[in-house]
Image (tube, grey):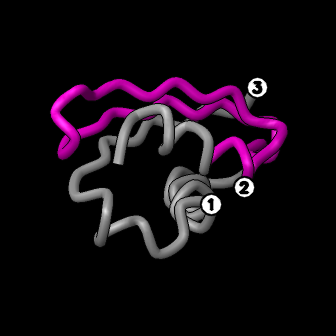
Amino acid sequence: MTKDEIRALIEAGMPDAQVTVRGDDGQHFEALVISPSFAGKPPLAQHRMVYAALGDKMGRDIHALQLTTRSA
């Protein structure tokens, strides 16, 4: 899994999001996801939205993802 694949998955699942993903070792990634859909939601709910966009890739193909979320 690459950072570009992760970004594409998140963008496909959350079309209104601005997504930046870093990580070059294929194992550890950092993502910043900014979305108006996060407005009024606590951080845990925001993270769940991102994990839902990643589907079964999370924990299987993506081993470590440090996630930062913000509403736009």
* Residue hosting label 3: 72
Is tag 2's residue or tag 3's residue first in the polypeptide sequence?
A: 2
Is tag 3's residue or tag 1's residue first in the polypeptide sequence?
A: 1
- Relative height, residue 1 to residue 16 (above, below): below
The mark found on residue 13 in the picture is: 2
Say if mark 2 contacts mark 3, CB within 8 Å: no
Secondary structure category for the residue under label 1: helix
Can residue 11 be found in the magenta stretch?
Answer: yes
Is tag 1's residue or tag 2's residue first in the polypeptide sequence?
A: 2
Secondary structure category for the residue under label 3: loop
Which residues fall within the magenta stretch?
A: 10-39
Return the x and y of residue 10 as percentages of the image width and height. 62, 47
Q: In the shown orientation, is residue 38 left or right of residue 68?
A: right
- Relative height, residue 72 to residue 63 (above, below): above
* Of 66 and 28, the residue lying toward us: 28
Question: In which quadrant of the rendered view does residue 17 lie?
Answer: top right
Question: In which quadrant of the rendered view does residue 45 lie?
Answer: bottom right
Of the residues shown, which amino acid type is indicated by label 2? Gly
* Residue hosting label 1: 53
